[in-house]
Amino acid sequence: MEVNLGLNFCGVNFPNPFVVSKVPPVGDVEIIAAQLEAGWGGVILRNASLNTAAGKQTITALRGKAPLYRGVDYEEKRIIDLGWIEPQAPISVEEAESSIRTLKERFPDSVVIAGMVGTSREEWLKVSRRLSQAGADMIECDFSISNGNSADVKTVIAHDLKLMEKASRYVREGARSTPVILKVPGTLPEREMIVETLKEAGANALNLFYEPKGVPGINLTNFIPFPNVGGKSTLSIMGGAAIKPYVLGILAEWGIANKRLGLSVLGGAYNWRDCVELILMGASILQFHGAVLQRGVRFVDELKSGVSDYLSEKMISSVEKLVGKSLPYFVTEENLPRSSLVAAAIDEEICTHCGICYQICEGLGYHAINFSDQRKPMIDKKKCVGDGLCVAACPVFNCMSLRRVSR
Ligand code: SF4
Ligand code: SF4
């Protein structure tokens, strides 16, 4: 079946929903061109600002002095996650304008989104106007940092709805008809009020991101946590497959609160399956940063073919039809339908008789699994309380499930 990976997001046609966000850190236009050449649906340029001096000094001062990235191993598998302490540095408006013109001339059908930050009415207005006039398809305002040079949480615009509203109005005025995305932390509370306020202020979409800080791991030989910078470590921003469950949760909560703004999401996808899940939960556009750094630009081939095959198998003609399809199945905890009884069931054809389910149920004290001399697990439906821990722990995929029962 012929499927369409393209979609219309806020009036802009994307050839596919996969977008590279601000890679490489230095904003080299030829590297960005190679991403579009490889088939990514769009790119987001590094934040443009009128004030770039301080950020550049920070980057220059750190160069060569620190391993900024650290992969996370789990059971000797690399890499399920990536931690980094890379500082942010904006580019000048002139650099952004030149990149937009070059990229739009060479890739008219791909989407070029111009990132920006601002600290004053003048800056939001001027920069957005210039980016729009240079031909950016969309403008993404980064409310996650104050001015591109500081990550001080107290100065982050996203923590003040009034500031976000003001900045959105300035950008709407400057950007004129160019669609505007606002990059905000997915963990913000009072989502309905935020959506209403920012929509009224002229925003078209939100880019939700989740970047928890953590320690990627510890070197068991010398006891130093990763990443090791001259023998010391610090908190890293975490991203990658390990944060997918949180990103899905964030999308679900915004999906319930939001009926008016388009949703894009940054992070949480490492393969085509992750992409499908994030789209099902309401994200139209998926932004990638760490995954592109780790896997290179051709990673998009895997995403495109995986999602195409999935759509084809499900007889769904386009990605657009997939967006938010899981949201009707997500409710708040008190609204879960708890009227039916369930009990564990086992697919005997694929059971390996390992006995893990038996040990678990015994440990919980329910004694609902009989494990005979032939090591054949049998569920006692009268004793089973349907909590599903054995289903979650069974090492054979799809071997155990919870089924409705009547008692
Ligand atoms: S845990 Fe799964 S595979 Fe192992 S005995 Fe139970 S049902 Fe069979
Ligand atoms: S669902 Fe709970 S009670 Fe039922 S068999 Fe599994 S572990 Fe035991």
Image (spheres, rainbow, N blue to C red):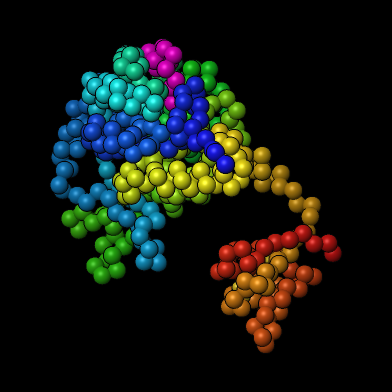
Q: Is residue 195 above or below residue 400?
A: above
Q: Image check: 215 left or right of 208?
A: left
Q: Position of residue 56 (x, y in %)?
A: 19, 32
User: From the viewer's perspective, is residue 250 above or below residue 159?
Assistant: below
Q: Residue at x 69, y 84 (%)?
A: 372
- Which residue is situated farthest in the front direction here? 1
Left or right: 127 as drawn, with respect to 340: left
Q: Is residue 354 magenta?
A: no
Q: Is residue 265 left or right of residue 312?
A: left
Residue toward you, 260 or 105:
105
Percent position (x, y) of residue 256? 61, 35
Tell me what residue is drawn at x 74 percent, y 64 percent. 343
* Residue 106 screen position, x and y as percent: 29, 26
Q: Quadrant of residue 147?
A: top left
For residue 269, say whether it is visible: no
Quadrant where the C terminus lies?
Answer: bottom right
Instruction: Report the residue at 42% width, 17% height from top.
Output: 178
| Quadrant in which residue 367 is drawn | bottom right
Residue 273 seen in this snapshot? yes
Of all residues, the one furthest to the right in this rendering is 407
Q: Residue at x 64, y 76 (%)?
A: 358
Q: Which residues are magenta?
A: 170-181
Ligand 1, seen in the image, is in the quarter at bottom right
